[in-house]
Structures are given as C-alpha cells and as structure tokens.
Image: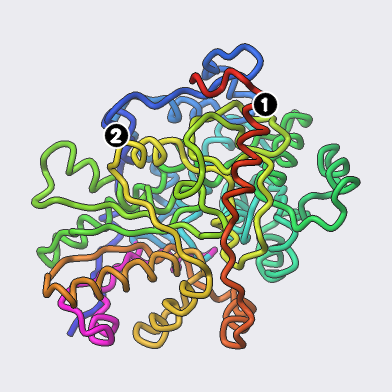
C-alpha cells in the first residue's frame, strides 16, 4: 500500500497563480489614513521591490516564475503528498485523507516559497539587506535562508515570547547569516518607546512589524519583506496547490474539502487558490468546500470585525480592509506563534465575507490532542500551527464516519514541529491552558480604532 505520491523536478510549476482576476468582487485597496485615498502602487516601493509591488496589484492570472527561483525551489520541491491510511484506520472513517507536506524544505515549512522569491527580486534591484518580523520563527528562518541563497543580509525582529520559547529557531537564522532581535527591542525608536511603557510585554507580530518597517525606511540599503497577508506573498505559495492538483491526478482523486490553518493566510491560500480557480472556471469535477482554521487565542476572522485597520501596532502601514482584532492586539503566549496576528490576508477576508471560505477556531489543548493522534498514526510531528488543520480534518473525518460518506479531504501540513518540543512537553504534562481571546477586548480595540478614525466605518 503506497502512501506517498511522487512528482519529479520537472513538475515544479512554471507560473504562480494570481487570484485577483477571479475574486467575486474587486479587492478593497490599501488606504492612506491621512488622505483617506487609495495608496498608489508607487508609494509601496519605499518598502518593497518594484517587481513585488507590480505583482501585488497585477491583473494577470498567471505570473511566470524566473528560472533562478525554480532552480532554488528544486532544493526541496516538489514536496510530497501522502495518503493518511493509518489515520483513516485509527478513526475508522470512510473518508480519504491526503496531506501535502511542506516540512521537507530546509527551514522546515512552506515559508521559503515566498522568501526565496522575495530575496531574488530584491537582489535583482540592487538591495543588499531585508528586514522582517517573525512570530514562531518559521518566517524569519525562511527569509534568512532565502537571503543566504542570493547573497543578501537579513535583520529579523522575533516576537519576544517566541524568541525565548524557541531559541533554536534563532540559531537557525544565525547559521544562515541573519541577525535576530527579540521584539520589542532596543534597536528601533518604536521598540524602545514600547519597552518603556510595557517592559514585561511578550511582544506581538504587530509590534515586530513596526520595528522591521522602521528599520527598512530609515536605511537606504534595506527593504522590508513580509511573510504573509499581502497578495504577492500568497501568490508565491500557490506552487503548493498547483503541485497538489497534479499529485491527486496521479491517483484519480479530487478533494471535497480543503483544510488549512490561518494566521496571516499564506499557507492555506497557497493550497486552495489553484482549486478555487477550478471552481470559478467550472473545471472542478465536484463541489469543493474550503475550510480555514484559526486559534481561539487569536480569532481574527471568527471574532474580529471586517473593516479597515493597520497591519502593525505603530500604524506605519496603510489601512487594509481585513478581519481584525485591532492593531493594538497583544496575544496570549500560545505555542502556535505563527497564528498570533491581529489581522488576516485581505483576499482571504473578502472570500470569507462572501461565504466562499468557512472559518472555525480551536483552542490549543484540543489542537495538540489532535496532533498527538496524528503523530501516533502517521509519525510526523506537526508544528502547532498546522495542528489546527489536523483537528478540523479529524472532526470532518469523524462526521463522515457517522454519515457513511466517502469524502476526500486534503489538508496542508505546512511545517514540522521539531523546534516545538517545549510545546509538546507542556501538552504531555497537562500544562497547556485552553486560551480563548475575550470578545470584550476585541470590542475595546475596535472602539479605539473607530475613535481614531471616525470615518472608517463608512469604507
């Protein structure tokens, strides 16, 4: 019984898929909070490489992948897909469960799919250093890796609680030439000011983004790099879904459900966008449901408000229309660091608001229980982030057991958990609390946002 579905290097995609032409309505543009007008693409070039800005707003459905990037992708792509026979037997479900595994990349996650691309386009434009933020460290290690491949320097602001929870992620970044700071840090004006007011803060992605942006805009040699949320980032991840479609063709199957975790939205979008393309172009052989899973400790879509907000705490970014918990959000210190963000990708939020994507949330205790069952059946130790998807997969498979439906479930195991042993140790010791972010704190943050920009609710 074969569990692994193979593709060779010749199957690495030659184009990224851009969802913008196929959205059910136009994506609301970034807005300048001072003028209340849409931000022109040229203004974004102060932060990002010109080619990345072009991709961000492109109306082209297919964007060619340069051969220099495909050559680097071949270090780990195509990634494997597995049929989870042992999990199916453990659950006694008639459902067929497949998972695309991105943990085989050198940094151990899906993140280098865009990190390598962003480093390449910045290198082509003569940029010598990239700055960024990172939560659990997967994005930071991916960017350090990507920059190393193209001879760039990298400066990474790592959310403080993760910096100390996951010290070997920092070591990994440093091995690839990155310089890493716990955020908030003493390196930036915003970091120093925040530390004065909140010296014991665990940090947040919003704070780390502010520091990375400040660093980039105050140094001529640097540009900023983002690991999720924006259109060009999600587009680079579509190599995942494009490969997955080819792998499923090899076993003559097609998903009824596509499931993934969401923190900013890039890994899940990378998986489901190419299947969404099949749906909107009437090429899908059946109805497909797209299900996104987030943490109850950072429930941006399930509890947040769909409105314009900043992507960072210092309000340095333009306003983006997205589901938000408020840009001053500071999360509880859960182990799924990549899911601790106050907002979400605008494309994903639009699709959720149009009922094209379902969203659910789980707490970390039930998530680690699901990851434990997966490890005992399939062997792979999941990162805490995709463990949320595993929980949703198990729930759906058990529903199929009750109804007798032979559905096909595809999910993304977007990274391994080899750097997350402390989290698993706490789980096994019964030390993980089931955090749930209070709705009252969401209301308070949104009220502050509306007080800051009284006109914002009309947009």
- Mark nearest the camera among 1 and 2 is 1
389 falls in the magenta region: no
From this view, report whether residue 80 is shown above or below residue 261: below
Residue 222 x/y as whole percent: 70, 35
Q: Quadrant of residue 339?
A: bottom right
Residue tagged 2: 62
Q: Which residues are magenta?
A: 79-107
Q: Residue at x 56, y 22 (%)?
A: 456
Residue 9 x/y as whole percent: 30, 59
Q: Residue at x 31, y 71 (%)?
A: 395
Is residue 131 visible in the rendered image? The answer is no
Q: Residue furthest front?
A: 440
Mark 2 residue element: strand
Residue 386 x/y as whole percent: 44, 65
Residue tagged 1: 451
104 falls in the magenta region: yes
How crowded pointer 2 is (Cα within 10 Å; few <14, some 14-19, many 20+) is rated as some
Q: Which one is nearer the viewer's eye here, 407 or 235?
A: 407
Is residue 288 visible in the rendered image? The answer is yes
Q: CA distance from mark 1 to mark 2?
A: 41 Å
Q: Residue at x 13, y 67 (%)?
A: 251
Q: Quadrant of residue 77?
A: bottom left
């Amino acid at each position: 019984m074969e569990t692994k579905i193979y593709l060779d290097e010749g199957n690495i995609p030659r184009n990224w898929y851009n969802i913008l032409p196929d959205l059910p309505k136009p994506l609301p543009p970034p807005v300048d909070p001072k003028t209340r007008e849409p931000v022109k693409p040229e203004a974004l070039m102060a932060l990002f490489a010109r080619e990345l800005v072009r991709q961000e707003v492109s109306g082209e459905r297919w964007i060619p992948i340069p051969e220099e990037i495909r050559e680097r992708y071949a270090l780990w792509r195509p990634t494997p897909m597995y049929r989870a026979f042992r999990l199916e037997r453990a659950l006694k479900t008639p459902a067929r469960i497949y998972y695309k595994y991105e943990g085989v990349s050198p940094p151990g996650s899906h993140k280098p799919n865009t990190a390598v691309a962003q480093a390449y386009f910045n290198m082509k434009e003569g940029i010598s250093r990239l700055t960024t933020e990172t939560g659990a460290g997967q994005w930071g290690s991916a960017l350090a890796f990507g920059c190393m491949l193209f001879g760039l320097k990298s400066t990474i602001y790592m959310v403080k609680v993760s910096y100390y929870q996951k010290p070997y992620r920092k070591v990994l970044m440093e091995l690839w030439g990155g310089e890493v700071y716990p955020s908030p840090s003493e390196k930036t004006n915003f970091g120093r000011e925040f530390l004065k007011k909140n010296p014991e803060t665990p940090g947040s992605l919003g704070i780390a983004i502010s520091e990375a942006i400040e660093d980039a805009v105050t140094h001529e040699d640097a540009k900023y790099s983002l690991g999720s949320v924006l259109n060009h980032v999600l587009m680079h991840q579509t190599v995942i879904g494009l490969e997955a479609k080819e792998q499923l063709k090899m076993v003559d199957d097609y998903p009824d459900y596509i499931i993934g975790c969401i923190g900013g939205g890039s890994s899940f979008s990378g998986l489901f966008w190419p299947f969404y393309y099949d749906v909107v172009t009437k090429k899908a052989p059946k109805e497909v449901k797209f299900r996104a899973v987030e943490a109850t400790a950072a429930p941006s879509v399930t509890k947040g408000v769909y409105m314009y907000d900043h992507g960072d705490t210092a309000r340095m970014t333009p306003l983006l229309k997205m589901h938000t918990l408020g840009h001053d959000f500071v999360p509880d210190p859960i182990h799924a660091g990549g899911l601790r963000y106050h907002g979400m990708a605008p494309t994903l939020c639009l699709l959720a608001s149009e009922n094209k994507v379902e969203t659910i949330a789980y707490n970390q205790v039930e998530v680690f229980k699901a990851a434990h069952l997966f490890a005992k059946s399939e062997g792979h130790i999941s990162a805490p982030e995709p463990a949320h998807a595993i929980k949703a997969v198990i729930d759906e498979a058990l529903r199929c057991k009750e109804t007798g439906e032979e559905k096909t479930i595809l999910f993304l195991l977007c990274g391994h958990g080899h750097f997350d042993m402390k989290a698993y140790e706490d789980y096994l010791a019964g030390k993980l609390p089931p955090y749930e972010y209070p709705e009252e704190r969401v209301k308070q943050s949104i009220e502050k946002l509306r007080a800051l920009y009284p006109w914002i609710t009309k947009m």
